[in-house]
Image (cartoon, rainbow, N blue to C red):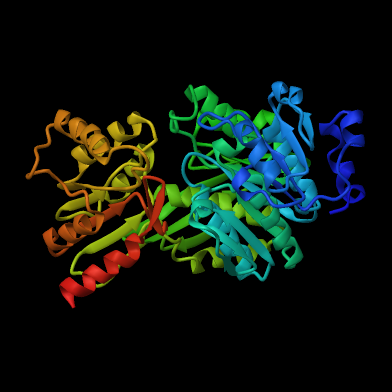
Amino acid sequence: MSKVNWIKNIEHLFTEDQLKKFPENITGIAFDSRLVKPGNIFVCYQGRNINSNEFIDDAIKKGAILIISDDQLQLQIHRDVAVFYIENTRNALSFLSDAFYNSPSKDLYTIGITGTDGKSTTAFLIYSILKKLDFNVSLISTLGVYINGQEVSMDEDKTRLTTPDPPDLFYLIQTAQKAGSTHIILEMTSHALNLDKVNPVKLDCAIFTSFSPDHQEFHDTEEDYFTSKSKIINLLKPNGHLILNADNLKLSALSQQADSSISVGFNPNADVSIKKMKESLFNIDYLLKTDEGDFSGSTQLMGDFNLMNIAMAYVSALKSGAAQSKIIDAIKDCDNVPGRFERINGAPFHVIVDYAHTPDAFEKILNTLSSYITKRLIVVFGCAGERSKERRIGLGKLTAEKADMSIITEEDSRSESIHDIVRDIENEMKKAGSTAGNDYKIILDRREAIKFSLQYAEKDDFVLILGKGHEKSIELNGEFIPWDDRKITNELINIIYN
């Protein structure tokens, strides 16, 4: 891309002298030296685990024509290409990527969603509503990338990122814009907000679904985690709307930080108040009470948490330009969110696959099902490696208290020892009074763990397979092993019961 076409979008990042030395033609932006191509800008930074400044020479050998570094010492080393020092190169990476792809989100109605839980379901609901109502809409989410109804395939290591890294993110947004999308929905994690991945994006609507302690492996304190997520408010356009969970005092207090905020929740004083009218297994009739009137609907999505997701999706769709009279019907048609409380049929008992992998998400699902369990609850679960031990403790405690049989297995141990992860979970279960064999079993092979649960279960039992949901791989020692809980469970049910 010619310098003249995009330099105006990044002038604020550089000094006048740096702008004069800026290359005339750029072919792309890279932050991984292995992915550098001739004509690229290489942006490097000192991360927690890797200092990419150490790979500057590798990037130059691959054809990088400009280096942007957060290490002033790099200016003292003679090289054949220009080296610029910028204090916050992560922020620079985002704005460079955005500018290279011609700031694509500026032409789209953009919805950003953050929160500990509920992000993906709310995002998918909004996407489904707008698509049903014939909007050209795209989605970049944990559940995948969808552009105008078509799923975009990506490498597995990239699909695991809820919010893609800036060069990929802004390429995808531009792809959506060029394909004719008028609306786009972006999940925004605390990591992405903290690391300035999404700074150039300006939001028409920001949604904060929920908050509970998590990701202590990345955030030093709970307040740091909350502050990172709250940065989504800074991305709002002057006339943008902030949608908040009215049932969480920490979140509802954020309403003062936006000119237009809408509270949503079971709290009767919320701007959009949810009332559950009638509930049975896999069906809820509900009422949304608003200033414009009361609107009744029904859904096959289970749980109060899904009613919250539905209400937030309703408000967002309304602000996006969807007709109020049609939104409720569109919600009813969305009877399944991939890997979220997803029923697997064919067994003489209930089988549900869900992505729940935090204590808060576990508790919500277990509480939702509690009134429908007449026999036994059997839970297959594990815990991801390179995540806080508090998560393992919470999961072990909850399953010990609520499940009749738990099968502890592999989830995504990553670089950690699966044995260490399982030991942490097991220790907590023992503290709660569980005994091996009677209350839980350890089966490290996830397929065998699921198989055991299906053979152990009897008529009218509930089998919950938690932690993976929609995901299509297991991350182990730097590799992504093909995997799909839903597919494996279906296969095993067919073998055992058909």
Tag count: 0
379 sits left or right of 365 in the view: left
Give residue 373's position: percent from left, percent from top: 21, 54
416 sits left or right of 24 in the view: left
Give residue 278's position: percent from left, percent from top: 38, 57
- Seen at 56% across and 49% down, the residue is 312
Q: In the rendered image, which quarter is residue 80 located in?
A: top right
363 relative to 277, above or below: above
Give residue 291's position: percent from left, percent from top: 65, 47
Closer to us: 14 or 408? 14
210 relative to 72, above or below: below
Give the quadrant of the C terminus.
bottom left
Residue 461 shows in the view: no
- Seen at 12% across and 36% down, the residue is 434
Give the quadrant of the N terminus.
bottom right
Residue 230 shows in the view: yes
- Seen at 70% across and 55% down, the residue is 171
